[in-house]
Image (cartoon, helix red, strand yellow):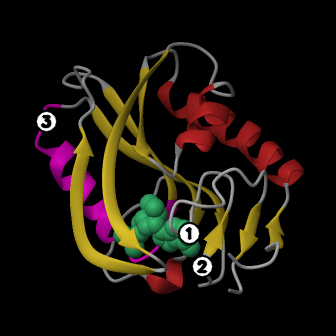
Amino acid sequence: MPDQPRVLIDEERIAARITELGKEIRAVYGDETVVCVGILKGSFLFMADLIRKIEGPVQCAFLGVASYEGTKSTGVVRITHDTRLKLEEHHVLVVEDIVDTGLTLDYILRILGQRKLKSLRVCALLDKPSRRKTEVLVDFVGFEIPPEFVIGYGLDLDEYWRNLPYVGIYDG
Ligand code: IMP
């Protein structure tokens, strides 16, 4: 394992931005129910903090996908856990940790787009727009970051570092 990572976004900035995101999200949906679909595993901390900042009716589901090995995208996306919640006729908000090439999100949106949803939007804590390989619309973005591999606050490197309370840069 590498030495302690460099801080990119500290705990206070993460918390402050999530409070803003919660308000932005609620403003879009009015008083309607929002079904937050967290993409496992990376989004689990973000999801837990975000839903507590979206006031009013919220439901939670999780979709498990695997796409990375080490610091490289394998380019192959696999579903490892399905939502187990009726999404049809609901407003669905996909909650992602990070959008990098956009391939994972593109795949998820195509799968969810086949269901009869009231609406489909995306909230990502982190966005690396310069790394995109496919165009995907991210409706709510926490932070745009440079094209570096980041860890912490749910994001991993080979399953380590998810427990870091901040987002750090892996210099390995
Ligand atoms: P994409 O398909 O390239 O957009 O990658 C999406 C997924 O890859 C994210 O949901 C993360 O799980 C993972 N990922 C992408 N970039 C990073 C990173 O910098 N650190 C950790 N995981 C990442």
Q: Earlier in the sequence, mark 2 or mark 1?
A: 2
According to the image, label 1 marks what residue? 157
Give the image location of residue 140, x and y in percent: 55, 51
Distance, label 3 to label 1, CA atoms, is 32 Å
Residues packed near mark 2 inside 10 Å, few (<14), some (14 to 19) or many (20 plus): some
Which residue carries the number 3 mark? 115
Is 126 located above or below residue 75 in the figure?
above
Question: Contact, CB < 8 Å: mark 2 with mark 1?
Answer: yes
**SS under mark 3:** loop
Q: Residue furthest front?
A: 1
Measured from the top left, where is residue 8 in percent x and y?
Answer: 79, 71
Inspect the image, locate mark 1, and give the three-letter code of the amino acid beneath it. Answer: Leu
Mark 2 vs mark 3, CA separation in Å: 33 Å
Which region is colored magenta?
98-116
19 up-or-down from 140: above or below:
above
Residue 49's spot in the image, x, y percent? 67, 34
Mark 3 or 1 closer to N-term?
3
Mark 3 in CB contact with mark 1 (< 8 angstroms): no
Image depth: mark 2 or mark 1 in front = 1
What residue is disc 2 on? 149
Depth order, front residue of 156/61: 156
Q: Residue at x 68, y 59 (%)?
A: 152
Residue 137 % position (x, y): 39, 62
Q: Is residue 160 above or below residue 1?
A: above
